[in-house]
Structures are given as C-alpha cells and as structure tokens.
Amino acid sequence: MDRSSLLRFLSPDHQLQEDLHESVSSTRLGGTGCWLFEHPAYQAWSTGNNSLFLLEGLPGTGKTVLCSSIIDALRDKHRSSERTAAVIYFYFAKYDLRRATDESMFSSMLFQLCRQLDAVPIELGVVGDLANDKQPQFEKLFRAFATAVRRFPQIFIIVDAVDECSDIRRLIATLQSIIDWELDGLHILVSARPHLFMREHLRRPHHSHHLRYFSNTDENHHDILRLITARVSEQLSFLPWSTKQDVIREVAAKAEGSFLWAALMLAELGEVRTQQKVKHALATLPKGLSKFYKRCIRTSLRRSSTLAEVVLVWVGYAHRPLRIDEVAEAATIKAAVDPTVSPKKQLLRVDDALNICPDLLQTITIEDTNESFQAVSLIHSSVRAYMDVKLSHWNPHFEIAQACLRYLCRLNRPDALNSSDYRQRFPLADYAARFWHYHMERASSSHGNLDRLLGIATEFFYSPGDIYLQNWVKLFDPDRPWISKLDVSNRLPRVSTPLYYVSCLGLTSLARKLLEIGKDDINATGGTHGTALQAAAYHSRLLIVELLLEYNADPFSRCGLHGTALQAAKFVGHVEIAELLRARMQKQSTREAGQDGNMLDPPRHIILNRGEPDPYEFRGELGFGNTGYVDKVESLASGSICARKMMRIPKARRQQFADVVLLMEQLKHAHIVEIIGSYSIRPDSFILMKPVADWDLKKYMDSEGGAIADAASLVRWLGCLARGLAYIHMKQVKHKDIKPSNLLVHGNNILYTDFDLAHVFHSMDDVTRGPTGHTAPYSAPEVADGGDRTLTTDVFSLGCVYVEMLTVIASKKVWDIFQKSPKDPGYNYRGSNEAKAVEWLQQLSFGDKERECGEVVKITNRMISQDRPDAVSLSDDLAFLANGIVNTMSSKNIALVTGANKGIGYETVKALLASDKPYHVFMGSRSLERGQEAAATLRKECADSSNTVEVIEVDISSDSSIAKAFETVKASVGRIDTLINNAGITKDLDHIRGKVSLRESLTGSYDVNVAGTHVMTFTFMPLLLLSTDPRLIFITGLGTFDQCAQGNFPLPPLERGWPKKMDFETVGYRCTKTALNMLMLDYHYKLQKDGVKVWCVGPGFLATDLGDAREMVAVQGAGHPSIGGRMVRSVVEGERDADTGKYVVKDRIQAF
C-alpha cells in the first residue's frame, strides 16, 4: 500500500481528532496550563527515558484542556525536528462511538506517524491486508503502529480520558506493552478520572519514573479564575463592574477546582436579569456539583415528577446513548399496565423529552460507519455518579428491565418486523431486545421486585406460539450478538429453548425459575452451541453450569460448535467449569454403561465464520517469527489468559497446520507448552497455548525486558531441557528448530515451544531427506548442507544452546563466544566454529558450580560433534541437574500465601520479597495464568531483591487442588515455615445483584472462607511442622462479636419494612470471618505443644477486589492493600510474637 492510499484509509479516524483538538485549543484561554510546564514532574517526564505520566483529576477539572496545552507546547518545541520527533494524541469520549475504541486510537495515531514519514515502511504492508479485509483488526493496527513508532528517536504520546475507552483493560495492557519496548525516547502521558484499576496497573516504578497525580487543588485555581473572568466579560457584560467583581470572587472561591461547576454557575447567572437577583443567586450558590444536581432534580420533579424520574433513569442508566425518539417512547411506558404504551400519554413532539430535565440533559451526535443520529445524554458523567449514590432507591435497572420486556410483548404479530419502517412504529424495539438482560442482571433484588421481574420474563418467553421469542431473536440473537442489521424478510427465525438463551446470557435466577417450571427439555438441542449446558460452558456461566448439572443435564451430549460442553469450556479457558464437567463425566462413565470415556478429551479445532467476533482479545505482544505472531490474549468469556500464535495458512499448507495441532496435543510434559485449543477465522488460524511465558531464553540470557539471568536456574534448566527432549523423541517426534527463542522461561521453569517444523517419525532410524526449513545459527552441518536430518540433529541444536547457557552461567555474554551476535552472518557452530566453541568452553570458570558445569561442558562438546549422544542418554547423564543439585532453599524462610495474585495477598508477597530477610514465597492462585502474570509484575517491581517467588496453582474450594499443591511443594522444597491463609470470597453482593440465591450467598462463602481454609491448613500441616519456626496466619476482619455488640455495622439502621432496601451487604462474609476466628483458636489450642505460632490478623478496611466492590469501598475511605501486606509481614517477622493466639490489628489486640 502506497503512502497516499494508507493515509486515505486511516484518515477518517484522525480527522475527527484533528477537528476536536482545534476546537479545544481555540477555546483555551491564553496562559492556561502554564503551571504544569514548570512542574518538576512534567519536566522530568518530557526529558526522561521511557517515561510515563498519569494526569489524574476529578470530573470537570480541566484535564482535556491541559492535554491540548501539552500537545500544542510539544508541537511548537519539536516543529523543526519532525523527521526525528513525533507528537501524537487521541481524545477518548465514552458516548462517541468514533472516539470510544482503542482501534480508533491506533488508527488515528498511525495516521499521524505516517504523515510525518517520507515513505511508508515495507513492514506496514500488514495494513494493506487490513484495508482489504474491510473491517478493523486491532492486532494488525497495533503491529503497524509498533513499526512506525520505532522510526522516531523521540515520540510523545498524549491520550486524554483513557477511562472512557470502551475496553480499558485491553488499552492498559497495550500501554504496558508499549512501555515494555523500553524505547529511550518514548514519553507517554495519559489523563483520567481517579480510577483504581488503571492506577494500579500503570504505577510501575521501573517504567514510571516521574508519575504524579493532580487533583482539583491549587494548581488549576488561576486557570479557573481566567475562565470565570472571561465568561463574565462575555456572558454577563450587562452587569455593573462591581457586581461582575462579586461574581468573579464568589464563583472562583467556591469552584474548588471544578471548571464544570464554574461554567454551570455562570450559565445560571446569565439567566438572571436584575442586580438584586444576582446577589441572591451568589448567596445561594450550591456548594459543589452534588448540591447543584440535587437542586436540578428537585426542580424537574416538581415540574413533572413521573416523567422526570423516568427520563433520568433511562438516560442515566441506558447501556448506550439513546436516540431522542427512544427517550420520548421510554417516557410514556407504563410497564405495569396494558397497553404498555398509551397513545394519550405520548409526547406530541419528541424533542419535548429534552425539556423535562433541561439542566441535566444535552443532545450529542453519534456517528459510526453506518449512520449518524442525535442522542440524549447527561451533561456530564458526574451526574450519573451522583445518581448512583443518592437515587439508588429508584432501582433504575429493575424499571428499565421490566419496561423492555413489556415493550417486546408489543411485537405480537409474525409480521411486526417485516418492513424497514419498524423503527418508526416501535422506536424502542432495538434497545429493548438487545439490553433487557443487561438491566435484569443488574436489577437490585433488595427491593423485593425480583420475583415480579422473573414472572414478567417467564411470561415473555412462553408466549403463545413463541411469537415474542421469535421476534426477539430476529432483533437480537444471543448466538450472534455482533449482527445489528435486521433482516426484514417475512421469515421468522428458528429458535432454541428459552433455557438455552438464558444460559447464554448468564441469568442464573431466571434459569432456576425456568427449570422449576419445567417446560423445557434440559437436553434439547438447537442453537450454535447445541445445548444449554454447552452454551453456559462456552460463555463461562459457572453458576448456570452448576445449576444445569444439579437438574441432571447430560454432559455427554455431543452436538453444537464444540462437540461437548467440556470442549467448549476448555476452548475458552475456564478451568473451573472444565474440571466440574470432567468430574461429572468421569463419575457418570464409571456408573453408567454406554458412556464414552474418550469424550473427556475430544478434538478442539473450531472454525468460526468470517466477521464473527474473535473469542480471544489481544493483551500484549510476546514474539514473532517467520510463520506468525505470538501474543498474550484474554478469553472474553472466562477472562483466562493464554498465549496465542496467529498464522495465515495458505490452502496448500492447512493440512500441515492440522498436523502441528495434533502433534502438540500429544505432547504433555512439564517442560513443553500445553496446547489448549485451536481455531480459524479465515484467513487466519490460531493455536492457544499455556503458560504465558515471562521471556524466551534468548531475551532471558540477554537480560532484556527486565529479565535477570540467574545462574542457578540456568544450571538446573540444562537438565530440564535434556529431559524434555528425551520425552519428545520417545513420543516419536522431531522438533527440528531448537534455539533459545523457541525455549520459554516461565517462573522457575523452562519449556519447549514452536513445533511448526516438527514431524512425527515411525522408527528411531527415521530421517528427513532434502532441504528443510531451519535456523542457520543452531543447525547441524547435515541440515545446512541439505543432507539427512536424524534425531541427533535435535541434540546438536540443543548443544549449541548449551554453549550459550554455560557462557551466561560463567557471567559472560553470548556475543563473547564468536565476537558476534547470533543474528550476524557467520554465527554458527559448524566447521571451524565447532573447535572455537570447544576451546571457548574450556576457558570458562564457573565458581562454586565448577563441578557440575564441568561435567556439562564435556557432554556439550560431544553434542556439537559428529559423535552425538541420543536424547535419552543425554537425559540420564544430566539427571542430577534436573533434580536440582543447586538448592538454596535451606537458608530461606518458605512462605505460602493463598489467594495471592491480587489484593492483600499480592501485597503480602510483595512485602516479603522487599524484605531484607531471605524468603522464597509460594504465591497461591486459583488460576495459574493470572498467578504467573502477577508474579512477573512482582519480579519487576522487586527487581533488586534476592528473594524469590514461585506460583502454585491452588483452589481452596477443591480438595484435589489442595492435595496437588501439597505434593508440588513437598517435592520442591519439602517444608514450609509460614502458611498465610488469605484466600477468601464474599457472595453477599452477588445475592443483592440477583446472581445467587440467599442460601448460596452464605454456603458459598463458608465453603471457601471456613471449610476451604480448614482443609488447606490441615493438609499442609505436615510440611509446616518440619519448620524450626512454624507460623500460621489467618487473615480475618469484620467478624467480631465485640464490635457488633457495640453497634459497629457497615450500614446505618434501615427504614421500616421488609425486605430491606440495600445496595451493600456483608452479613455472610462477617459470619464466615467469625467462624474463621474460632478456627484459629482451635488450631492455636491443638498446636501449643508443637511450637506453632498462630494468629488472626485483621489488616483493616482496605480497597480489594472482594465482591467486585473495590471502587465502592475506596470511595468510602478504604486504604490501599499494601497496608495489609506490610502488617502481615510484621507478624511473619516476629513483631507480634507476644500476641500469639490473638486477633491482632495495627498497634493493638482486637477482642473477639
């Protein structure tokens, strides 16, 4: 693609950004933001290397204007060096679909970069593929962006309102990937509202050298004063000079850093026409936005109480911006009566909907690739935040959900949607069909209306002749949610059972209701996924899978896209659902005749339609090669993280791709990556693998990306690689491409990957003849010459890798071997270079590892010669290394922390790693992938520490998982010194949100917090008793009789009536922690003579992910989890030894 074609293709996404920037800059007052350029943090960011700056402020405090100032200042500074410096930017906006996606951001930024280049780099040909596909593909845009960025020695990236991106998780993961490129000239600045998730993921000290937070304090006072003075001059010119000064003084004094509040107050004052009323208005200015919103809502309710409430609910809580005609239609719905929409109550003019709450509503233009339309939104996102806190008693999601279902019941004729004007007749039909379930899932059950809502939904699903159901699926098919254009033909769609669709959508309470009614065959087939069970497994609906199995759904049913429900769960990476289904299938296969046990591990390759959404989403780059890219991806269904290799396979090579998948499925070994699935969305094919590596061996030995090569690990891995190769050959497979970049470092393990060139052989004497693909630096002489490739060819390649590993163990660099890099011409171990490598190895000194490494040197010399050992003999010779001769654990305190991949557990591990005392910490995590991701971050955050962390997969709700973890620790280190029982859950909020029953909210929490902790402690006790200073800690909180007896509850006394109206609940969690305190006392009593020190530790009120309520409790003043981590460490290190057997909190003992 030539430069002009590329710019033409990318320009639509950027033109809007250019127009917006010009608009913001033109309205910016002179001198605005100058204070920022003098700030030490900004100056350090703009001149530092690979620097990140987070500009954080409350809504309305002028972040967008500051960003525009920064963009213009940097452009002016670097205008004369456009070939070497680039300033690129993007303004996010939640409600503008053209400005809400990270795809649009990279498209716009790529345009800005390419516009500065004289010619388009050949590597950007991938964008040509993107243009030909006629649809956005994020990964291609990102790779093209990565190529273009590297063309500039200095690059400044400014991104405004990142918290308004539609996929903030992917955006932040991508920003982290960009930081991990470690480009010296890279400077990233992002602005956002206070956002805990973003702050924690961007506050990375080794990359964020000059990170500061700015709030609505004194910094922007002068900017607000300029704004007020200018607006008064423009809008209030009719006032006397002295009154103008009063306005400027009073508004500036009460603005508290909020440009938005100041602008709203000045707009109100502009409507006042007498000096006396101006003075009265100044005396009664509402203090802060909350008071202003309260006054506006009261005024609107007095003016039109019913309509005002309805309009605010719909506009404030709709899942997307509503068209004006949709708001007008919603305003007239009476969900409790028929007909649902009364013509007598319809607005005569749809624009009248805006006049119901004029101070809080505004019109916005929504544009996408298909259309442009006027929509209604709140004047600012802070209005919604106010409504969440002050108007929750309206139960908005319940109101919208029941209105949507009632509205859909108007589609009671087969031809209701058979013409393109259906939107004029049913303006709200599209929204109601697509989002009723979203609102039902979020409707609060604490208002006592859940049963009523379930009844309405049941009536909708079981309409006579399925007419409601068919018209709903015509508008919105849960199997194909990406299709938005309605087929207006006369044909009604074939539908599956209501239970199937409810299982897709994850509506647990409704699924239980339908099962209780019993009208559907639970094993009925239909739909993309065949059965309700397979649909629930694919969409990661754990509670519904449990519910369907409780009602005896058949896990062996073979149908649908994935074959079985187990296969669907494995494809999306939901480990817990897969284990649940596998256990049920194993139980049934042993109990019932005729069940096929082979179905426990069926073929996995899935072919998806072109245009269908990718079930996995990009989270970062891992590597690339001749055959494709490898990325870190996240399952959109389960949230699990894995590695994905993407290849574009020509038709002639598709069988080779299938062979590679089949080959990898057969290889199951501790030192080989595991394939978890494969799929195709033409023209691309994908292989899913785990684990996600920290580095490949090449980067590890070169100390790239934060890696710190550890000699002890490298020595052990010499044996591990020999064992792995022996296994590969015993499985009758040749790898044919062994090299450092095809060996992955994952925690303390090393794994073979990339079997693209591999093939299965039939006998140990089997050879590959003729020229084949190979990597020249590590290829044996016979391969380079096009001769026969035997099994020992793999041994030669591994020997080359050993030479490099031994070099790094000896504290040398790989470059030193031949005075050149492996990517330079002539780097190989063939011919005369073999002798040079042998001579090089003889010169190396290995210090205290001389004995074992000396043996490896002798073996390596044979491996790169013509007289090579076979892989099995090699493994036997090096077995002493794989078994871990380098054991440094005896001098370290071995700690195991459950639930440690986030929150207090994560911060506890971090505190131990940062300690000046020696630790090896087992980081317990239900998900191995998420644990490894957390451990990788910790290693970077604690890069200077000599302490070590190792991830161990353990789910304390599973006895088998606990037993497996016990055997792993026992085989690895043989003891533990400290067990920290941190893992815990709460289901109280899930009950309020209608996700679980009242009983499940209590029993589910007890199963983990009490029973799971007890089993974990009981199982690991033999290892703990082998310690010379055993310590047992239970993390507790919110669970003492003493506190509750004094009236210390999370909520104030509630209004009369039943059930109580609550948006926050902790009763189940508090009960479990009270029980946990008893468990601690029991262990303390039983272990007195064993010398075990036991405590309950209350870390305090901290903002964790418990119950998905981190943002909520942070607003209530919860502290950072690191406070708890440091407190736990103080107990581990003996500061509370005098309080053993007690419930300890900071600086005191808490009564039970």
Image (cartoon, rainbow, N blue to C red):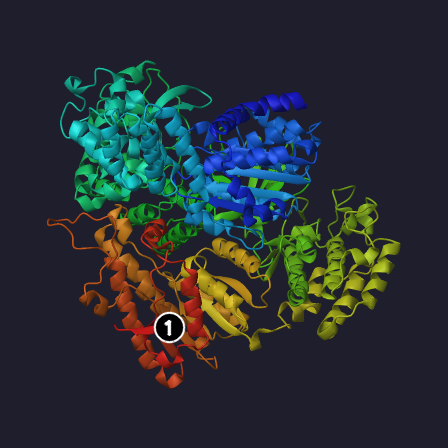
Indicate whether 378 appears above or below 38: above
Front in this rendered view, residue 562 or 716: 716
Q: Is residue 425 above or below residue 742?
A: above
- Disc 1 crowd rating (10 Å Cα; few below 14, some 14-19, many 20+) is few
Decide if residue 235 is on the left or right side of residue 822.
Answer: left
Residue 952 image point, x, y percent: 49, 62
Q: Is residue 520 visible?
A: no
The image shows residue 889, relative to residue 334, as above or below, that is: below
x then y, percent, for residue 53: 53, 46
- Residue 359 location, quadrant: top left
Camera-side residue of 685 and 396: 396
Q: Residue furthest right?
A: 832
Residue corresponding to mark 1: 1018
Residue that appears at 69% across and 68% down? 878
Q: How far across and how far down the image is residue 584, in percent?
A: 36, 53
Query: Disc 1 marks which amino acid?
Result: Phe
Q: Secondary structure at mark 1?
A: helix
Q: Nearer the viewer, residue 1002 or 202?
A: 202
- The quarter of the picture where the N terminus appears is top right
